[in-house]
Image (tube, grey):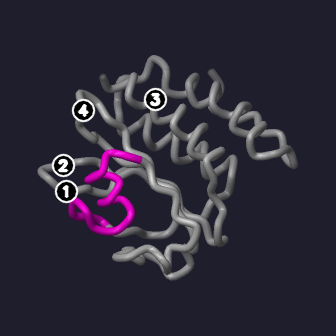
Amino acid sequence: MAEDLKITKGIPREETYIEIIPQIQALISGEADLIANLANIAAALKETFGFFWIGFYLVKENELVLGPFQGPVACTRIQRGKGVCGKAWQDKQGIIVPDVDQFPGHIACSSLSKSEIVLPAIINSEVQLILDIDSDQLNDFSELDEKYLMQIIKLVEESIA
């Protein structure tokens, strides 16, 4: 497959997800390397939606360690239960934060981040990694984003299960 994305500009976000998810599936199908797949997913989401920061944190020796990402430099390590990512890891569930300044214990890797969505990939009842997306706009994420980003998380889970 050619590594060019086919992105229709100016369509509603839901239609954009519907358009990009099969392309992400094609990008990662047949590739066994997790880091390569996460890097391509982060790049595809950044190119498609233009969010401020998109990346993955991998669970390694009882902490989250920065993995592939697109955007400005980021926090390298996060403890369980700390910040939005650590809380999603601890609770094994996604979190949508409309205003990061209102989230108790938010870890500000960048003062430009205003809202955030964080989703865990769970295999054998354990979180393996976290997808973290930040926006420089308040209230930029909804259940719609969670629905479609979870489809991408399922693709990642299937690729490493």
**Residue 157: which quarter of the image?**
top left
Which badge, 3 or 4, is on the more N-terminal residue? 4
Residue 133 within the magenta-colored segment of the rendering? no
The alpha-carbon separation of the residues under discs 4 and 2 comes to 16 Å
Q: Which residues are magenta?
A: 76-93
Task: Identify the secondary structure beneath mark 4.
Answer: loop
Percent from the top left, x then y, of residue 55?
A: 45, 53
Is 123 displayed left or right of 73 in the figure?
Answer: left
Task: Say what amino acid the circle numbered 2 marks.
Answer: Lys
Say which of 3 and 156 sits in front.
Answer: 156
Percent from the top left, x then y, of residue 66?
A: 32, 57
Task: Identify the secondary structure beneath mark 1.
Answer: strand
Percent from the top left, x then y, of residue 83?
A: 34, 68
Task: Say what amino acid the circle numbered 1 marks.
Answer: Glu
The answer to whether 134 is drawn above or below residue 95 in the figure is: below
Please rate how many residues cluster around mark 2, counting C-alpha atoms within 10 Å: few if below 14, some from 14 to 19, many from 20.
few
The alpha-carbon separation of the residues under discs 4 and 1 comes to 17 Å
Which badge, 1 or 3, is on the more N-terminal residue? 1
Residue 137 visible somewhere in the drawing: yes
Say which of 66 and 111 sits in front.
Answer: 111
The alpha-carbon separation of the residues under discs 1 and 3 comes to 22 Å
